[in-house]
Amino acid sequence: MEIIKTIGLTKKFGDFIANDNIDLIVEKGEIKAIVGENGAGKSTLMNMLYGLLKPTAGEIFIRGENVHFDSPNDAINKGIGMVHQHFKLVPSLTISENVMLGIEIDKKIIVGKHSFSMPSIDHKRESKVVQALIDRFQFGLNATDVVKNLSIGAKQKVEILKMLYRNVEIVIFDEPTAVLTPQEIEAFFKTMRELKQQGKSIILITHKLQEVMEVSDSVTVIKQGKIIGNRITKDTSNKELARMMIGREVLLRVEKHYQDYSEKPIIYEVNNLSTKNHEGINVVNGINFFLREGEILGIAGVEGNGQTELLDLLTGLLKSTSGTVRFLGKDITNEWPDTLRLEKIAFIPEDRYEQGLCTDMSIGENIIAGYHGNLDVCKNGILISKKIAEKRNRLIKNYDIRVSDCEGKVSSLSGGNAQKIIISREFDADPLLLIAAQPTRGVDIGAIEFIHQSLLNIQKNGKSILLISSELSEIMSLADRIAVIYKGQIIGEVSGKDASREEIGYLMAGILERSHENES
Amino acid sequence: MKVDKSVLKQIGLKTLNTIIPVLIAFAIGSIVILFAKENPLNIYFILFDRSFFRIQGFLKTLHYAGPLILAGLAIALSFKSGLFNMGIEGQIVSAGFVVAVLGYRWQSLPSITLIPLLLVSGILVGVLVALLPAFLKARYNVNEMVVTLLLNYAIVQILEYLTSNVFRDPSSGYVSTNMIGQSAIMTRLLGSKLTLFFFVVIIVFVIFYIIFNHSKLGFEITAMGKNRFFAEATGMRIQKKIMIIMLTSGALAGLAGAGWMLSEKFSYTLDFSGTPGLGWDGMLIALLGSHSPIGILIAGIFYAVLKTGSSNIAIFTNVPAEIIVLLQALIVLFLSLKSILKIKPIPVGKLFQRKEKS
């Protein structure tokens, strides 16, 4: 039975067509994966199904009934629920209170045949009802636990419970695994299969093809707002899906040569580094690591475990409360970003459009930023526009940056090409050490391949790289050693060559004992 | 030198965006003129003819344009970097006051040393007044807009006290400092109101044109204004830049005040800066010129035309000179429409960049 069917669904934002004539069919009781690169139009499509956006043209049918949604409430009433990537929970309330938010059960007084609602909430009844729901789906939670004490995986379950309590038949998951550890991802897949067992239909939006292959029944590939194709999961491969998403053959994993670096000199050393955030909490708490010449050290971890603050410390944007950073024997703790650049340390920042680029400035201006005082473009404080244009054209050519107008602004570039601007800028400075954070976040698979290859190329030239990423597969395919960050500390380290996902996964979840067992 | 088509189109749009509010203001102004039973075209003819198309009038216009251009540059410099130095007015009057006092005290010195000395003193006073908000902003991130804005009122009150008590010229019939010495007065050229000060302004203008469009500092100012995090992450030391920008802005304002004193006013009175005040005029000029140096040059001269023209209107017609104030107000009103329409200005410097062959 077709539970969702759309015919010619189209959404335009001005001249831009975000969704073009989408004919999507979701069968009852299946897990439907929708894949596509960033900006392909997945979110737009889901927002229309969930009543957050109104279609420009086309029809939506739920169980054969033509529906028009004005708000998510309408969608929920028709049985469609959505679990967002960023959870919408109240941390200080319990699980049952979060689930019941907006539809609380009031205390009742029964007098004879009549019952009167009291202006207070019947917490006992609420937790009983929610606990029953938890048990029915075997979520293994306690309805009276406070949400802020829960792990991220458990929080996601609370989001799902919110939808289940509202009796939805169809659950949409928007990039659900981005914030989970490998073990939590496994548990999440189990939950999804459980939901399917109970007759729910699931739409899974993702760009991780591995997950699609593992959990879904059918796949729809979207590219540039159009459906490129539908596949039954067991009849396809992630190679084929990647080709459909990009439109050409891609390497899913780059070739990496491992070698022994233990004889090479240590060039970068971080000792007992700590800092507090603006709330006075120790977000980086005594971090120690070192980096040898020519080596790639990956720092893995679930997002929000101090990576951002560590990065800000290492790039001179945040002051440490204690600890030292030494580079080539020199103390560079709390040095300014421009001094660090002069020491030949280059940066690929975490947030491309906030710290890495100024979208409102031209490509040329972005390509010299950070190195704009260097003699090749600047003499006596005057910038030489001819030299800037030369440098820009050279880098655009060497790094294959696709630009429609080289005089144009960076805002006109796609995510991948914008990232290439940063990469070309930092690589061209010929650094001895590169600190790269989330270098492939939000870029398409084609650009990921290019970026990974470029990182390995500069390693080949004897440069060291510190790679901070929450994308485990990225770290596993690039790093020689993998350190795992958990609650602002390096909780363990494994060799990149024979690391297992499971081992790193336990460390990411803060579980130490298991990894020791594995070592011995 | 080839000019990019899209750049030309943008410049066209930008110019249109500046001219249209002015035209609307003049159109509404003409209705008011009709109430005074005069021909608007006639009035506007007098306005422009006498202050722009006749040589003496034009030189007078340039004379008035000098401090306005400096004030406009001071505003643009800070606004472009995302800092809001609203204290230009206070910096101008402080500089004017100190220069008036020193110009009287040091009048035994010869012109050749005294005038440069006084101009430099004016600059220093401007820097000094800007120092407090700049420091508070750079060190403690105190909102510079509030500090500079409020400081204006404090300064005006202090100067009023000093002028009417400590430094008052007892022989004068109204509240005023002593007149500056003969040797401190800048000589008028070509029998017009124009003095050498205007050429000082032109030199400063050229320097700032280069700074805005071709220098490392200008690049960092633009980057700071457009994306602070980006500027910080790419190693432009924000705190240091805040000091440099705020103090330079103050220096420009100080120079404007000193020049206004030495070439026009000669003694500090309570209406030294006029109404609404040179600093506030500068803000309108910077807005009219889209914070670009060339735009500010044109807007400054246009604004000076209105200023000189207003006295001509009062002399030659029945329309009161206040019509000009009305026009100014209307221009401000319709200029703010520009930000509603959200067509982004582009740096004028782009016009002169060579198109690369690729």
Image (spheres, helix red, strand yellow):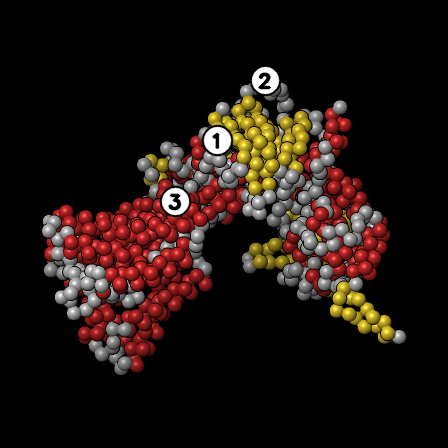
The foreground one among A16 and B304 is: B304
Q: Find residue B328 and name its label.
A: none
Q: Which residue is mark 1?
A: A332
Check the residue under mark 1 and report the chain it is in.
Answer: A
- Label 1 crowd bin: few (<14), some (14–19), many (20+), radius 10 Å: some
Q: Position of residue B4 (x, y in %)?
A: 39, 49
Determine the chain carrying the residue at label 3. B
Give residue A336's position: percent from left, percent from top: 45, 37
Instruction: Check disc 1 and report its element: helix, strand or loop.
Output: loop
Q: Which residue is mark 3?
A: B241
| Residue under the image location 84 percent in, 55 percent down | A132
Look at 33% across and 52% down and name the residue there.
B130
Name the subunit of mark 2: A
Q: Residues within 10 Å of mark 2 (few under 14, many from 20)?
A: few
- Which residue is drawn at the image coordinates 44% and 36% (left, top)? A338
Q: Which residue occupies 46% across, 35% down?
A: A335
* Residue highlighted by disc 2: A263
